[in-house]
Image (spheres, coloured by chain):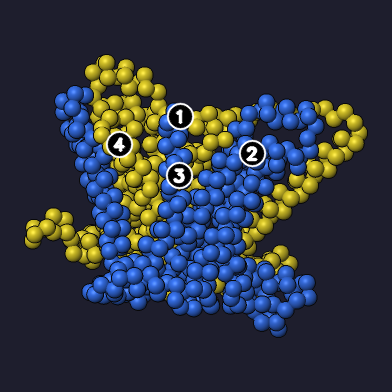
Chain colours: A blue, B yellow
Amino acid sequence: MDYDFSDDIQKIWPMLIAVGAFAAVIVGLLLVLDVLPRWGRHRWHVLGFLGPAMILLLIGLIIPAIRTIYLSFFDAGSQNFVGLENYGWIFQHTETLHMLRNTLLWVVFVPTLSTAIGLLYAVLVDKARFEGIAKSLIFMPMAISLVGSSIIWKFIYAYRSEEQDQIGLFNQIRVWLGLQPKQLLLDPPINTLYLIVIMIWIQAGFAMVILSAAIKAIPSEIVEAAKLDGVTAWQMFWRVTLPSIRPSVVVVIMTITIATLKVFDVVRTGTGGQFDTNVLAFEMYNQAFRYFDDGKGSALAVFLFLLVVPIVIYQVRTLRQRTESR
Amino acid sequence: MSSVTAAAAETSPLYRPEATTAAGRVRRRLTSRTASVVSIIIAVLWTIPTFGLFVSSFRPEEQIKTTGWWTFFSHPQLTLQNYNDVVFGQSSSQGQMASYFINSLAITIPAVIFSVSLAAMAAYALSWLDFKGRDWIFIGIFALQIVPLQMALVPLLKLFSDGFSIGGAQIIPAVSGDTPSTAFVQVWIAHTCFGLPLSVFLLHNFMAELPRDLFEAARVDGAGPAMIFRRIVLPLITPALASVTIFQFLWIWNDLLVALTFTQSDNAPLTVRLAQLAGTRGNEWQRLTSGAFVAMLLPIIVFLSLQRYFVRGLLAGGVKG
């Protein structure tokens, strides 16, 4: 049709130049580091290898994080100190309390159900025929953007009034069963659960892949010994498989919990946070970018960070144990 | 950890104790049948949503809007019009996906290259150069993974628009996204910063597993740290680099939040465009379907063809059996 590629070619050049310049700088840096005095004092090497990343982390994450903590004690325009008022606001309004409730629903259901389904599937397809294909099917949603996923699910949740044909599969099934079609995303709090299903659909594949690898790593002697003892599949799962892969299960649950706390795109494209489906991460975006209230936005961000701190501490502890055991 | 991967990679021979009794045989067959049925049910449930969208994207507009995609099987009717509109159409109500596809490429490719290379260098310093406070820096970088991006967006945006100066001396100049040549600079830097913690963490896990003897031998031969990085470390961690690259690619290509903050509408990637189509033109179903598929195409191809590497990257994240 009338698409003209020449308009867009201009966008390709800056990209190539940037990549070229970057490559030149890195190669130059490595060559300079090469001629520096060898192992004796490698302060320069540390600086050369670690420096660029540290600078970016500093301006991209560390300074912003400190600034956000600071701003969370100020009002919308960051002019007047307000103490803990922004934090108080989080707990004092019906809307924000509903938002917290929704976030809680997400954090309770997504990690547990995705892990459970992923684990079940990993156990079931383990050593089955077509294992590779079977796993790809579940894993595929991981490759799709959350925006894309929300659109996919529109075709499940879409609503048409009773006289019309349904175009959403869920409501069509209701009609086939002789029920009324329903506006699924309108009624709180159940609408949050429908959004949660989307996230479970995405995360189960992640859980499945990790847990499947963990299951395959269980020493075969243990499995064989259990089989010789004549355990049933059920006992095998609870007494052998699950205890052996417990550390992986913990890692999976924590990783999905963090991803869930940050969930933003699903709500944004699913309902736009309307109809009482708001969550913490989305409200933070709204406060900072739609209402330009840096204080409240920052307070929400800090609050979210505080929720994840226990997970960080736990992971750092296991990380240290592992380094020590190495 | 390497043992986990190794054990996962080799398919251990099946162990099947001979069923001694008829009852045992029947019971075993029943469990395996239930297992198959349940796994097929899950697989179907997980595939139907994407499949429905896929079928819909080839159906004519008025059919998408009036009947469910499953009626396609009783009244099959295919068209490529949706794709044609959404990819090449130039009116703003159409997709203009071709332009946004280029934007996505122009954002993703440099950002992936920047973050993976810098992360590889940092991971090398953190795993094989000895210096004070090394472990604490590593733990700090690990912890940064959890900083909610939303927290970093506003300050980073301010930094881009004002630059950074100490006592009137401009240390970092302001980066405007207004001219075509610098349009993507902000989003590149943002993605590079945000991608670093995970990449450093994963690459460090791989690098730390390399045998110490290699480094000592090279050192004896008179190679400096930079030469060892280029000649020994990089070739050995190529699979790890591949897996981290795929991670970064999927993450940046699929990102909405960073793109919303750091790109203007002309330079926005596919995800932003899709979100717009889904929001303001919620009734243009025919464009949503094909548009969503255009946006998914590249990640799914990359993902399916390089799945092995992707899984390796996931498993490096500290999974112990």
Q: Compared to B121, does A170 lie above or below?
A: below
Disc 3, disc 1: CB below 8 Å?
no
- The amino acid sitting under disc 1 is Ser
Residue drawn 39% across and 67% down? A300
Q: Which mark is residue A315?
A: 3
Question: What residue would you read off at disc 2?
Answer: A243
Image coordinates of residue B189 in percent, x first then y, are: 28, 54
Question: What residue would you read off at disc 1?
Answer: A325
Mark 2 or mark 1: name the one nearer the start of the chain. Answer: 2
C-alpha separation, residue under disc 4 versus residue under disc 3: 18 Å
Mark 3 or mark 2: name the one nearer the start of the chain. Answer: 2
Residue A326 visible, this orientation: yes
Question: What residue would you read off at disc 4?
Answer: B134
Residue drawn 41% across and 40% down? B202
Mark 3 or mark 1: name the one nearer the start of the chain. Answer: 3
Dot 4 lies on which element? helix
